Image (cartoon, rainbow, N blue to C red):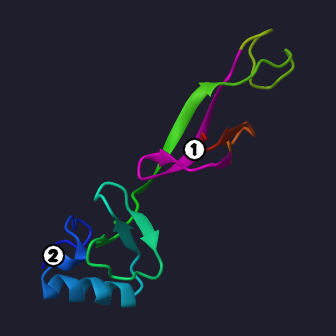
Amino acid sequence: MKDLTKIDKPFGELDDATKGALLLAHLRGEVIGVSDDGLTFMDCDSPSWIDGLIYRVQPKPVIGEVVLHGVGPIYHSLHPNMTGHNQDYKISVTFPTRDGQYVPGVYTSPEGMQIKIEVAE
């Protein structure tokens, strides 16, 4: 059986075993992707199984995290992390990734500093 996440032929050109495996994957709750060009796949809740479209099981996302190290803002000399007037202190903020892309949201460091990740339009 071929890897159902790597199908690159239209549904009508697949052998019966692969078609059956796709149908079974859909019935078992796997996310099915559909494409007309084989390059961009969209999630498809209700596949129509049209012969000219390419269907595949969508690959599971790769989940990870990134730690951003940087310099915090300058406060006044009474800030507990500062050793002298107008000196910076270092912060770290950890935030998740999905398929190598940053996940939008607001993430807070242990020191209380925040970073906001947005999706570019």
Name which quarter of the figure residue 119 lies in: top right
- Horizontal placement of 117 versus 59: left or right? right
Above or below, 19 against 55 in this view is: below
Work out whether residue 54 or residue 75 is closer to the camera in this orientation and state it.
Answer: 54
Query: Any magenta on residue 1?
Result: no
- Horizontal placement of 54 versus 30: left or right? left
How far across and how far down the image is residue 8, in percent? 21, 64
Work out whether residue 117 or residue 74 is closer to the camera in this orientation and state it.
Answer: 117
Q: Earlier in the sequence, mark 1 or mark 2?
A: 2
Other residues around mark 2 within 10 Å, as few (<14) / some (14–19) / many (≥20):
some
Q: Amino acid at mark 2?
A: Glu
- Horizontal placement of 40 versus 82: left or right? left
The quarter in which the N terminus is drawn is bottom left
- In the picture, the disc for residue 13 is 2
How far across and how far down the image is residue 18, in percent? 18, 82
- In the picture, the disc for residue 73 is none
- Horizontal placement of 68 versus 10: left or right? right
Name which quarter of the figure residue 31 lies in: bottom left
Instruction: Look at 70% across and 16% down and name the residue there.
Output: 88
Q: Amino acid at mark 1?
A: Thr
Residue receiving disc 1 = 94
The quarter in which the C terminus is drawn is top right
How far across and how far down the image is residue 7, in percent? 22, 68
Q: Which residues are magenta?
A: 88-106
Say which element carries label 1.
strand
Say which element carries label 2.
helix
